[in-house]
Image (cartoon, grey):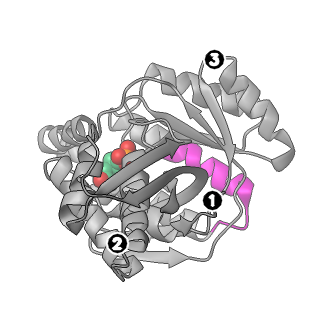
């Protein structure tokens, strides 16, 4: 029997613009998915297409138990975390000797297949390696880890990544003179953020600017705006949606002493609040018993 876990992720800066070759900054977060795999004569009936595909690709049979601290379909990378924890547990239980790189790559291929081609390697990479990651279309690079005091607010409004990516694509096609400079400005904000990790106040301001630019691209949602405003009013340095938008989650960067107050303001809007920070570990073996 082998138990492994893998973290979820947030986009700090640059979502949507990464689709157009601009830099994005993503970070692994503390809530995790835990998966136990035990070898067996046959594979138990699996509802999740991700889990089915993990067993099929690695050509093994057995039973699986999944426990998640992440809400699914909220933009926190829960499907990638499930996939990476499952591949890691199968790798361990069956002694397959896959490297972390191979696990990240296989996880991405599985996401791409299950999501019919619409997956970026960001979630599976961040979930495998943890930490702070600079994402471009062709590459992913680890940045020095930073202990950012974050509060996540989950609107509970379902979030459809493909739909939001298509929405931006339509705007780029129909109004290139408006959409392209907005995407260019998101790039400048991400570049500025890369130089501002020592200064939480500045990082918060950059998040506010990034939020306005994402709203200009039409990927905001009234439920997200409500949480963003509530977090700022409660003292956050800044706040923005994270991931595809149109629902899902927002993040706020806070003075450490105000994390609970910001979380309270989010909960008061009938949303789920998660106080978190960076997870530098990525996929890891869990002790059981
Ligand atoms: O909502 P998520 O976590 O699936 O993030 C989507 C981020 C996009 O930039 C909109 C798309 C992508 O694949 O990078």
Residue beneath the point at 37% across and 66% down: 90
Q: Which residues are magenta?
A: 196-210
Q: Helix or strand or loop: what does disc 2 sit on?
A: helix
Residue picked out by circle 3: 269
Residues under labels 3 and 2: Cα distance? 39 Å
Residue picked out by circle 1: 288
Residue beneath the point at 51% across and 25% down: 155
Residue beneath the point at 61% across and 77% down: 144
98 in magenta:
no
Which residue, as the protein is rendered here, is positioned at the far right? 257
Q: Nearer the viewer, mark 1 or mark 2?
A: 1
Q: Quadrant of residue 109?
A: bottom left
Q: Is residue 205 above or below residue 264?
A: below
Q: Helix or strand or loop: what does disc 3 sit on?
A: loop
Work out whether mark 3 precedes mark 2 in sequence or the reverse, and give the earlier one: 2
x, y percent for residue 239: 60, 40
Residue picked out by circle 2: 103
- Numbered marks: total: 3
């Amino acid at each position: 029997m082998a138990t492994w876990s893998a973290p979820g992720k947030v986009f700090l800066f640059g979502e949507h613009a990464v689709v157009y070759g601009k830099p994005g900054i993503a970070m692994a977060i503390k809530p995790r998915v835990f998966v136990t795999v035990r070898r067996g004569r046959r594979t138990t009936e699996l509802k999740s297409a991700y889990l089915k595909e993990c067993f099929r690709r690695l050509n093994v049979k057995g039973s699986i138990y999944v426990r998640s601290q992440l809400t699914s379909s909220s933009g926190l990378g829960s499907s990638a975390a499930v996939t990476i924890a499952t591949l890691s547990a199968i790798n361990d239980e069956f002694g397959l000797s896959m490297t972390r790189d191979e696990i990240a790559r296989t996880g991405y291929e599985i996401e791409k297949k299950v999501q019919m081609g619409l997956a970026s390697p960001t979630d599976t990479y961040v979930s495998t390696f943890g930490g702070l990651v600079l994402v471009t279309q062709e590459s992913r690079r680890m940045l020095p880890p930073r202990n950012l005091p974050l509060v996540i607010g989950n609107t509970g409004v379902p979030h459809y990544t493909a739909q939001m990516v298509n929405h931006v694509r339509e705007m780029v096609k129909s109004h290139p003179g408006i959409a392209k400079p907005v995407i260019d400005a998101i790039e400048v904000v991400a570049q500025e953020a890369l130089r501002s990790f020592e200064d939480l106040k500045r990082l918060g301001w950059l998040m506010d600017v990034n939020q306005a630019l994402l709203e200009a691209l039409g990927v905001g949602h009234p439920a997200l705006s409500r949480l963003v405003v509530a977090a700022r009013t409660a003292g956050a340095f800044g706040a923005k949606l994270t991931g595809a938008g149109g629902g899902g989650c927002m993040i706020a960067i806070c003075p450490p002493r105000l994390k609970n107050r910001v979380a309270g303001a989010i909960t008061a809007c009938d949303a789920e609040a998660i106080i978190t920070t960076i997870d530098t570990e990525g996929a890891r073996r869990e002790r059981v018993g």
